[in-house]
Amino acid sequence: MIADCRSCSSQVGAAVWNSTWILLVSIGSHACADDALDEAAYVRVNQVGYLDDDTKVAIAFSHQPIEGKFALVDQATGNTVYTGELAPSSSPGWGTFPHYYRLDFSEVKTPGRYFLRIEQSGETSSAFRIGSDAYGAYQSDLLVFMRQQRCGYNPFLDMECHQHDGRTAYGPRPDSSIIDVAGGWHDAGDQLKYLITSSNATARMLLAYELEPEKFGNVVDELGRPSPNGIPDVLDEAKWGLDWMHKMHPRPEELYHQVADDRDHTGWKWPNQDKSDYGWGPNSYRVVYFADGKPQGLAKHKSKATGVANLAGRYAAAMAQAARIWKEDLRDDEYAAKCLQAAVEVYRLGKAAEGFQQGNSYGSPYRYSEDTWADDMEWGAAELYRATGDESYLDDARRYAELIGSTSWLPHETAGHYQYYPFVNVGHFALYPHVDKEFQAKLASYYRVGIEAAIARGRRNSFEIGVPFIWCSNNLAVALITQIILYEEMTEDRRYHDFMLAQRDWLLGRNPWGTSMFTGIPRDGEYPEDVHTSVWHLTRKMVPGGLVDGPVYTSVYENLKGLHLTEDDEFAGFQNSHVVYHDDIGDYSTNEPTMDGTAGAILMMGHFGAADPMAPPLKRGKSREPEWTLDEGGIVRGRRDRKELALVFTADIHGEGTAPILDTLKSRGVKASFFVTGEYLALPQHEPLLRRMVAEGHYLGPHSHGHLLYSPWKDRGQSLVTEQKFKADLRRNLSELRKYGACDVKPVFFIPPYEWYNAQHVEWAQDLDCVLFNYTPGSGSHRDWAPEGHQAFRPSKKILSDILACEGREPDGLNGHLLLLHLGSERQDKMHKLLGTLVDELRRRGYEFRRVDALLNR
């Protein structure tokens, strides 16, 4: 690497980023050398796919006019499921190709995998999915890339690196003082570490978690190794950043902002064999720059710093968010207090030195040239107000909000590198819930000014892309998407939704090159492979989830030092004289994955993604869904705002009703949940029934192995079993169930024996990745176990009428109910004979039946 792979000086920026959008939409003069290319048409789609209700528009382009219709084809059957007209685009084209068409298939909502075909010529698009699960859990792939970027201990490479970081420059300590700042993330393909980008990456991951908590799984531990630890992986990754940020603020009056500089760029290298030399020998200490708010640079190139408020505001925002999450969700009061103290201290440093700290360079003029700061202080103040209730923070946030207003990159065609970082002002969103209606309207208007400037730019090209192609244009596209997501969250105004989808679709393949801008996404699609990183160069292993810098103006590309293509350009036929993108390791301007860009995109992927089946069951200390009802920490009811319920069947030694129950469910297309003990599993006649449960799509889970009574009936707070016995019993139950293909997705839902437990048992179950739940009280359905002559006995018809009476009596009916019945009993009056009547009547009343994992949003 010859220069800092992403940085660029503001002087160079002023010279080479003076391309305007009107150039971008001019018709290119060069023709394709290949005659087939001249004759062909190309269809560009979002390769990942579309949610059911998305506006779904593909783009086709060609050198020759196309007429007629297009078809949407089911990939599995080859059948055409929809035909539509090729609608010529009313926007200008994209240089090389003069003819552009819109292919709108928005009315198709049926889940499936499809491709588009142009009827006139037969050209087809990439395959894609339509459905609520189209985006799966790709947000987890982005976390894989973040783990690849870890410094200190790197779980992808399984090595420790840069353990000597570092020795200080500037600041209150004598130059070259040793300070421990090991950890954090390598910034991109290089191995520098910046508080400028890392503070934003950390805060944005915490924001993604707070807005989309159920979207994040738990497959690794805090070191990134494949060992679930009960904490969402996005929080493990954010904590990696938080821990490093704490090191960068070792004392109340100290804040450091950068580790290493462009002396890093000594070619491809293993991070634990760093050849760079900062005066203490190769692979040794690296310089650590103190944030003093003044121009810095150890050689001739100096930054233009004026203060530290940009760093301080973002730092405070991340730490205040962390204080809230670790206290409320993870119940770690000690770490929460540490984060809140750091937030208060560093925010104070920002108020004392309003202005911006920029990145430092050594031998080259390239650096991060951020020159905004009020947006960051607004964000920090708003988060501190939420964390502390101190009105002075709210006053500050309002002042900073009006100071920054709508300032952003959005109206501009040119900008210095990272000039308007972090590209979206989250402060307006964070402040919005805490101010009156009039001020809320002002905050929303600030977002609208920027969005509408991007829309105006998007009207000038057929792809509707609304960003200028300065360096890191993909980061800008993610920021624009994020701003619209936050605007919709604030206002419930969806006027910009289709425009947002166009930006998303651009990033995932609806662009001239037909490529996703994320490594490995989608797995069977076109995506960046030959990326500008040492990991790729040295290992040739593709790491999924990395967002590359993205297309740039040709004028930018041609004026950067050290760029070269190592192979023939596979996209040569789709380049034009104004904008280029190369999937080539030699092009660090377009094809280098970035840590902060990837972190910023996690919210976008989570927003469109499905709930992750590996998500931990609950936030520690409270439910992820405030609508859930808990008893002793166990879930006893799902959401009350949806007409959904779960049929839950348990069994120990009696199972005579299993086959007729399965028959009834199958005849009505209902999925239920079955929970059985080791006694039930041991009976040979139950084996085919267990296999049938799994084969027919029902949930099969544990009810304990030995059907133990966990607590005395009259003293629930005591435990009749030890933790060791509880866990050994449950593990055995799980082990036997897994022989049937059950319980292989975490978390596992678990209903305790005798439906009796206490809070301690909930925690023990959670240690085994099990969510303890119980039936919803009130309907009396569980009484179907009691035999004739028992004081709890109720005739089956009475149980049925009581269930339906409860539905009519309760304000929320049976919404969210976990309706418990049994697979068998000693009684002669069998409740399962009335199951069909119950299902039919509840359906008539508008209820939908869900498996337990679906009802509880897993």
Image: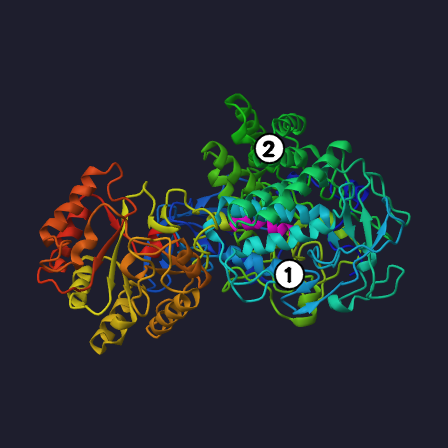
- The residue under label 2 is which amino acid type? Tyr
Asked whether 603 falls inside the magenta stretch, the response is: yes
* Nearest the eye: 124 or 130: 130
- The residue under label 1 is which amino acid type? Asp
Query: What residue did someone put label 1 on?
Result: 583
Residue 701 shown left or right of residue 145 in the figure: left
Residue 241 is situated, as x and y percent measured from the top left of the image, at 65, 52
Q: What is the spatial separation of the Cα atoms under label 1 and label 2, in whole angstroms?
A: 45 Å
Residue 831 shown left or right of residue 575 in the figure: left
Residue 478 is situated, as x and y percent measured from the top left of the image, at 58, 46
Sequence-first disc among 1 and 2: 2
Check the picture and name the quadrant holding the N terminus: bottom right
User: Against 824, is 131 above or below?
Assistant: above
Q: Which of the two marks, 1 or 2, is nearer to us in this view?
A: 2
Magenta part of the chain: 596-605
Residue 319 is situated, as x and y percent measured from the top left of the image, at 63, 44
Q: Which residue is pictured at 60% across the width and 67% down the height?
A: 542
Color theme of the render: rainbow
Q: Is mark 1 on a helix, strand or loop?
A: loop
Majority SS type along the magenta span: helix
| Residue lying at the far bottom of the rendered structure | 684
Q: Are marks 1 and 2 in contact (CB under 8 Å)?
A: no
Q: Is residue 95 visible?
A: no
Query: What residue did someone put label 2 on?
Result: 385
Residue 307 is situated, as x and y percent measured from the top left of the image, at 79, 36
Check the picture and name the quadrant holding the C terminus: bottom left
Q: Which residue is pictured at 47% across the width and 52% down the height?
A: 215
User: Against 438, is 430 above or below?
Assistant: below
Label 1 neighbourhood size at 10 Å, few (<14), some (14-19), many (20+)? many
Residue 833 quadrant: bottom left
